[in-house]
Image (spheres, rainbow, N blue to C red):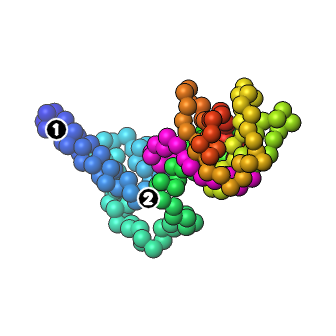
Amino acid sequence: MTAHLTISRTFSAALLLTGLMTASAVALDGDGLKACRSIEDDMARLACYDAAIDDAATVTADPSDIATPATPPTPQISAEQAAINAFGAEDLPQEAKAKPEKIEVDAITSTVSEASLTARKKAVIFLANGQVWRQIDADDTRVSISRAIGKPVEVKEGTFNSKRMSIDGKRAFRVERIR
């Protein structure tokens, strides 16, 4: 008799757990389960849990009641354009960084749309693609900004994550992206 009761309890507990797992998608009455938990007699408690599961299993959710969040449309750009936009973005402040796809770009080309000098006589180059690059203070290369406008530009990866800019194929100088 004891072995049969132990097997019956084990089977009932397994059945209860299976029922609880399958009913996890539907709402269970927490107060009803708490009431079942307080019953001292094992068989009566099991019957109470079975009844709570049966009641919960009859509740079905209408898919139209589930709200789906509206997502704004994202502009579609090519992976290559995203990678070009992200080139040098690690130099930008954290909030301005774009999250590119995993396409590696070793160099970009564009044309100079505008150029100026800082107070320390370092070049600031505005590219036609919207990027802005500044010559770093440690670079002593003189850049002729008056002749740079409209010329082709190439920015390449340098050593230790540095960037080197060459205007119209002339001597390259080290830069950092500021926008």
Nearer the camera: disc 2 or disc 1:
2
Tell which of 52 and 20 is nearer to you.
20
**In the image, what residue occupies the spot 55% across and 31% down?**
158
Of the two numbered discs 2 and 1 on the same chain, state the one appearing first in sequence.
1
Does residue 50 sit above or below 2 in this rendering?
A: below
How far apart marks 2 and 1 lie (CA) works out to 30 Å
Q: Residue at x 32, y 50 (%)?
A: 21
Q: Which residue is mark 2?
A: 27
Assign a secondary structure to mark 1.
helix
- Can you tell which mark lies on residue 7? 1
Residue found 55% across the figure and 64% down from its top: 75
Which sits in the foreground, 6 or 179?
A: 179
Q: Nearer the viewer, residue 107 or 36?
A: 107
> In the picture provided, is 144 more to the left or to the right than 177?
right
Can residue 130 be seen here? The reply is no
Q: Is residue 152 left or right of residue 115?
A: left
**Residue 114 percent across, percent down from the top left:** 75, 53
Residue type beneath disc 2: Ala
Does the magenta segment cover residue 111? yes
Q: Is residue 156 magenta?
A: no
For the residue marked with disc 1, what is the amino acid?
A: Ile
Residue 161 on image: x %, y %:
56, 31
Question: Looking at the image, which is closer to me, 56 or 86?
Answer: 86
Assess disc 1: are there few (<14), some (14-19) or many (≥20) residues with their C-alpha within 10 Å of its C-alpha.
few
Q: Which residues are magenta?
A: 98-114
The answer, for residue 55, to whether it is visible in the render is: yes
Q: Residues within 10 Å of mark 2 (few under 14, many from 20)?
A: few
* Numbered disc 2: secondary structure: loop
Q: Quadrant of the N terminus?
A: top left
